Amino acid sequence: MSDATKKAREDQLQIAATLSEALPYMRRFAGCTFVIKFGGHAMGELSLSDMFARDVVLLKQVGINPVVVHGGGPQIGSMLDRLKIESSFVQGLRVTDQATVEIVEMVLAGSINKQIASAINRAGGTAIGLSGKDGHLIRARRLERRVPDPESNIEKVLDLGFVGAPEHVDAQVLNTLAASNIIPVVAPIGIGAEGETYNINADTAAGAIASALGATKLMMLTDVEGVLDKQGNLVTRLTPAGARALIEDETVSGGMVPKIETCIDAAESGTEAAHILDGRIPHVLLLEVFTEHGVGTMIVEEGRVAP
């Protein structure tokens, strides 16, 4: 047997072993709902984006119901720059006036949403792009942020404009799509009581959707390996209490804080497990779902058997 033939045989055996390892997880998760927040580097790089689309189709093919929620901050910023519309950030949130929210909706519910849905369709799935305004999927209210005035130390309310917080998610809309073999791709735009449009943080929207659906997993794709301890080592499993402790002692800081808070809320609201995964890793969804040890950081309630 030639070296090339031996190598091909080894590759075939590895593929067979991988499929064999995946079988118990396919059976375990058949019929379950996974909410996947897609963003960061993975969304911006074509090869990773196409790989993500194929992996989502595979999840659907083996009986899992994926719901994709996406962000688009860099693309929004680029469009605002092109249109010479100034924007600013407060506590990591984009201050969103009327002109800005129109651009946010155009970019998120328009180009980005349809690109992701089209990629999934090219990979063999049936995806439909929608925003939280469609079917009143995400009803939202104006988000309030309070900060102490440095002079008086009295809290004042920040005016963030049309930045919203989810108030209610209509699970029936997404359940109907799942029952029709359709993969929903959701842009994080909400609708207010008076029909106004709200820009919702994509992580927050994904967490609210996961809680409303009673999702088995919330999977957050990021640009980092996962949650790291003070020595820079990956923390593979956390309880909500342990995650809060990392925030309080500032082991976790910056943009990771709202992601962790979203995972905590989901874990405490019925989602069996929340995961923070490195979206730069090829096939990261499949590695987490179908291998024994998974990847990234999992946040799960104390005493719960991890799914």
Image (cartoon, rainbow, N blue to C red):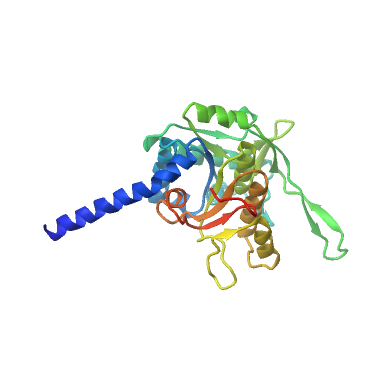
**Residue 87 appears in the picture as rendered:** no
The residue closer to the viewer here, 302 or 242, is: 302
Q: Is residue 188 above or below residue 277?
A: above
Query: Residue at point 82% right, 60% down?
Result: 148
Q: Is residue 137 above or below residue 162?
A: above
Please indicate whether residue 95 sits to the left or right of residue 66 in the image: right
Query: Residue at point 51% right, 58% down?
Result: 296
Query: Residue at point 46% right, 57% down?
Result: 293
Please indicate whether residue 212 sits to the left or right of residue 152 in the image: left
Which quarter of the picture shows residue 256? bottom right
Residue 212 position within the rendered picture, expressed as x and y whole percent measured from the top left: 64, 37
* Quadrant, the N terminus: bottom left
**Residue 48 appears in the picture as rendered:** yes
Which quarter of the picture shows residue 229? bottom right
Residue 171 position within the rendered picture, expressed as x and y whole percent measured from the top left: 62, 32
The residue closer to the viewer here, 186 or 295, is: 295
**Tally of numbered discs:** 0
Please indicate whether residue 60 sits to the left or right of residue 110 in the image: left
Residue 167 position within the rendered picture, expressed as x and y whole percent measured from the top left: 71, 38
Q: Is residue 157 above or below residue 244?
A: above
Residue 91 position within the rendered picture, expressed as x and y whole percent measured from the top left: 69, 57
The residue at the far bottom in this view is 231
The residue closer to the viewer here, 217 or 137, is: 217
The residue at the far left in this view is 1
